[in-house]
Every structure is written in C-alpha cells, then in structure tokens.
Image (tube, helix red, strand yellow):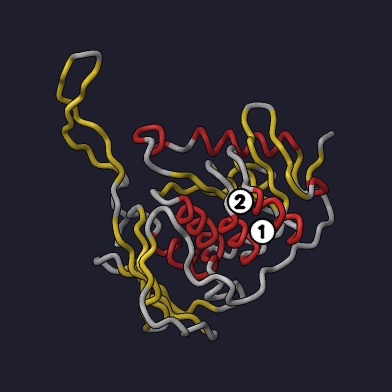
C-alpha cells in the first residue's frame, strides 16, 4: 500500500479587513491507523496517512509493549489503514479494550518495563552540529509551512539529519522516528531525537525505552521532563534556534569549543 498525500485542498471563505473572498486552502489529512500485534488489535491512532509501518512499530516500542531486541517476523500495511505485525517475543496482553489515541495524548500502556538509564560518557555532538541539525529540520518541514497543522520530528547524527517525519500528532511523529530506526537497524546510542515542539515527559519516556541519549528541540521541555532526564542520564537541549540553545541536563555529551 502506498502512502497517501498529507495535504488536500478545500474551498473556504476568507474574511480579511472587511472583505469576503473565496479561496482554496491546504488542509492536513487525518486518518485512523489500527495496529494489530501477533493477531491482537492493540490500538487505533489518529494520525497522518504516511509512514504507517514506522508509526506502528514506533508506538509499540515507545509505549514499552515490545523491546528493541525483539525480532520482527513480518509487517504488512493493508489498504484499510491496518498494520499487521508479527514479532518473536512476549508482550503484555493485560488490556481488555482496544485503546484509541487521539492527536493530543500519548498515554497508552506505559510502565510495562523499567525505563532504561543512559550511561553518560564521551561527547557526542558539538554545538555547531546541534544547531545545524535543528536548522535542517526547520527547513524541511514542508507540510507545516503549507498548513501550520503538523508537528515535525527527526533523527539526527553528527553529520546531519538522518530522517524526518511530519504528523498531526507530535507523539506520532516521534514514534515514526523510532520505528524507522528499528526497521532500518539504525543504532541510536550516538544519535539525537530532534523535535519541533515541546518536550513532554511522554516524549522522554519514549526516548528512554529506545535508548537514545540526546533530545534536541526548538521549543521548551517541561519541569518533569528535566527532572526525569537528569535521573535517566538523557541530555535535553531546548530552545535551539538561530545560534543559541539551552542545555537542561547532562551537558557532558556536548562539546562547546
């Protein structure tokens, strides 16, 4: 199944300084993705209709339902927006009802296994590299520039932005990043999660489950995120814009010289 377009146009009525006109405006497309794991429906996700496989895998990883060490036996994206996965490994089946996750919340399972603490050792990024990565994410956020209706997330390396995704849900965009890394067997120990928006505790939890050491955002983290990041050994960089940023935890990974 091919990805559908993220944007479609509709006719709207525009009021501007007392004048009423008709215009065709781009609107983000919203779909409902059903995730089936080992024959059992797990969740339905309100999302943008692209990178469905990455979103399904990333959601399962980010909520602690499966682990990065699990072997993926098969994955199939069907025409009716259903992703059917079969993995080798045990996963929690305690839930009684299928969860429906809208675009504003990410709380699914959570807490099924301990969050992974990161070892803080060698420096991974220079200040210049982080600023270049966030600038690249901004420059490639094409759907946001057209509609203002999506969030962006990406995977960064010292060489630059590895991959990026846009979605109506910020948690979905993050899940697509981790799903992409899993499906392409990309190690995360020396990478950063790159965000266009706020760094909430749920995002930090997804980072911990996926063992990524650095989160880089052009926006702010919450207080809970910063306190937990310091406990978990995760570097959080916020307000990365232009030629500046704030480091809220574990600056040891960043070279400022």
Residue 193 badge: 2
Q: Residue at x 42, y 51 (%)?
A: 169
Secondary structure under the numbered disc 2 in the rendered image: strand
Q: Where is residue 69 shown, x and y percent of the image?
A: 61, 76
Q: CA distance from mark 1 to mark 2?
A: 7 Å
Q: Is residue 6 above or below residue 64?
A: above
Q: Quadrant of the C terminus?
A: top right
Residue 217, percent from left and from top: 60, 42
Q: Which percent across, then down, holds residue 171?
A: 48, 55
Report how many numbered discs are placed on residues in the image.
Answer: 2
Density class for disc 2 (Cα within 10 Å; few <14, some 14-19, many ≥20) is many
In the image, 218 versus 227, the foreground residue is 227
Residue 247 location, quadrant: top right
Q: Earlier in the sequence, mark 1 or mark 2?
A: 2
Q: Which residue is mark 1?
A: 212
Label ID, residue 176: none
* Disc 1 + disc 2, Cβ < 8 Å: yes
Is residue 233 found left or right of 51 in the rendered image? right
180 left or right of 16? right
Along the line of sight, the residue nearer the viewer: 8 or 75: 8
- The residue drawn where x is 71% and y is 59% is 189
| Quarter placement of the N terminus | bottom left
The image quarter containing residue 219 is: top right
């Amino acid at each position: 199944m091919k990805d559908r377009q993220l944007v479609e146009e509709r006719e709207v009525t525009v009021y501007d300084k007392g004048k009423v006109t008709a215009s065709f405006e781009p609107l983000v497309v919203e779909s409902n993705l059903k995730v089936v794991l080992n024959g059992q429906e797990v969740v339905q996700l309100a999302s943008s209709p692209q990178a469905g496989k990455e979103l399904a895998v990333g959601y399962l990883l980010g909520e602690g339902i499966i682990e990065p060490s699990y072997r993926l036996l098969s994955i199939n994206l069907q025409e009716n927006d259903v992703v059917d996965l079969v993995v080798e490994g045990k996963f929690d089946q305690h839930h009684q009802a299928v969860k429906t996750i809208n675009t504003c919340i990410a709380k699914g399972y959570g807490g099924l296994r301990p969050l992974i603490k990161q070892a803080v050792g060698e420096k991974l990024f220079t200040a210049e590299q982080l600023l270049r990565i966030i600038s690249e994410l901004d420059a490639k956020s094409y759907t946001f520039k057209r509609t203002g209706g999506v969030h962006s997330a990406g995977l960064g390396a010292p060489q630059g932005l590895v991959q990026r995704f846009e979605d109506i849900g910020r948690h979905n965009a993050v899940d697509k990043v981790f799903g992409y890394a899993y499906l392409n067997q990309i190690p995360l120990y020396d990478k950063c999660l790159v965000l266009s928006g706020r760094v909430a505790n749920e995002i930090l939890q997804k980072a911990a489950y996926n063992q990524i050491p650095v989160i880089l955002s052009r926006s702010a983290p919450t207080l809970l995120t910063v306190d937990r990041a310091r406990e978990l050994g995760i570097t959080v960089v916020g307000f990365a814009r232009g030629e500046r940023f704030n480091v809220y935890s574990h600056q040891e990974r960043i070279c400022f010289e």
